[in-house]
Amino acid sequence: MAYDDPGWNRASAWLEGESLDPRAELQVVDVPINRSVTPGSCDLAPDAIRKVLQRYSTHAFHDFIDVRGVQVTSHPETSDVGALTTILSKGITALIGGDNGVTRLGVAAMKRSLNLEWSQIGLITLDAHLDVRSLDDGPTNGNPVRGLLEDGLLGSNIVQVGVQSFANSPQYVRFAHEAGIRSVTAEVCLTTPFDILFESELERLADRCEAMYFDLDLDVMDRVFAPGCPGSRPGGLTPLHAQQAARIAGSHPKVKAMDLVELDPTIDINDCTAMAAASCLLSFAAGMLGRP
């Protein structure tokens, strides 16, 4: 049982609905799907992320923001596109996965909820992988981007940030390039002021789209920081990079939804990956308080 300190406001209570003069609202829904190419238990991730939020405060120290200014409404877990569409129609939404297959469901639901054409939808991913594997065996965590292309999303409306060397095959690299997908490598992310880079890519995409979806695949982080992600590799980004991206995405008025995916709590070490994921959810909410 956690130590009960009346002066310590827990982020877990915020996720359960505790607010403080709310100026924004965030819909939160668990999407515990597990159709991974690599066998695992990503369906257990929502519970793990919610649990570690008990160890976080709601205060963003560097700019004195309290995320309790965002009112959270939690919804029953679902992987049904119709149910997700209804939730997204209520406002900005965070989907807690689950494997990366969540992204295809989430983007489709966002499109439906806003009654937009595919040409008006944008996807920005923070991911080590292109996620354009074959669809022959149905939807998996390895092909949500390819699935969205099949659904009608334009390749030119997709930006993938943090893509790593030796994590994608030449065949799929060619496929993504020919589809018109824009990729920013991990090497560039690690040698450039990342906040400026990510904001520039988000603005570039916003110029083309009416609404954007932010996919945060936790395996974009270096394996040291993401041992709970089967697909993480050495040479990835840091939790600070992921937090910065989440904060920037949360602050953009055209970002209508985000997801956190690819955590398998059964292989995590000392809740390292779960805590990184939870910090990104808090960062996204803090960003929302900076919207016009």
Image: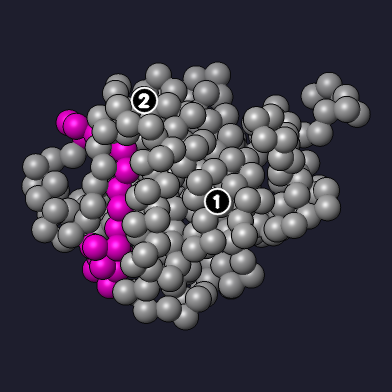
Instruction: Return the residue at label 1.
Output: 250
**Is 118 above or below relative to 286?**
below
Q: Is mark 2 on a helix, strand or loop?
A: loop
How far across and down, in percent of the image, does residue 174 sit?
Answer: 9, 50
Task: Give the residue displayed 56% in from the left and 24% down from the top.
Answer: 271
Task: Give the residue displayed 57% in from the left and 67% down from the top.
Answer: 88
In this picture, residue 76 sits left or right of residue 1: left
Instruction: Return the residue at label 2.
Output: 222
How far across and down, in percent of the image, does residue 108 sit?
Answer: 41, 68
Q: Callout 1: few (<14), some (14-19), or many (20+) C-alpha neighbours within 10 Å?
A: many
Q: Does the magenta stretch include residue 7?
A: no
Q: Callout 2: few (<14), some (14-19), or many (20+) C-alpha neighbours within 10 Å?
A: many
Amino acid type of the residue that numbered disc 1 sits on in the rendered structure? Gly
Image quadrant for the C terminus?
bottom right
**Number of on-image labels:** 2
In this picture, residue 41 sits left or right of residue 15: left
Q: Is residue 161 magenta?
A: yes
In this picture, residue 152 sits left or right of residue 22: left
Among numbered discs 2 and 1, the one appearing first in the sequence: 2
- How far apart are the two marked residues, 2 and 1, measured between alpha carbons? 23 Å
Task: Give the residue displayed 24% in from the left and 47% down from the top.
Answer: 183
Disc 2 + disc 1, Cβ < 8 Å: no
Q: What element carries label 1?
A: helix
How far across and down, in percent of the image, does residue 274 sit?
Answer: 54, 31
Provide the residue span drawn in magenta: 147-167
Image quadrant for the N terminus?
top right
Whether residue 193 appears in this view of the structure is yes
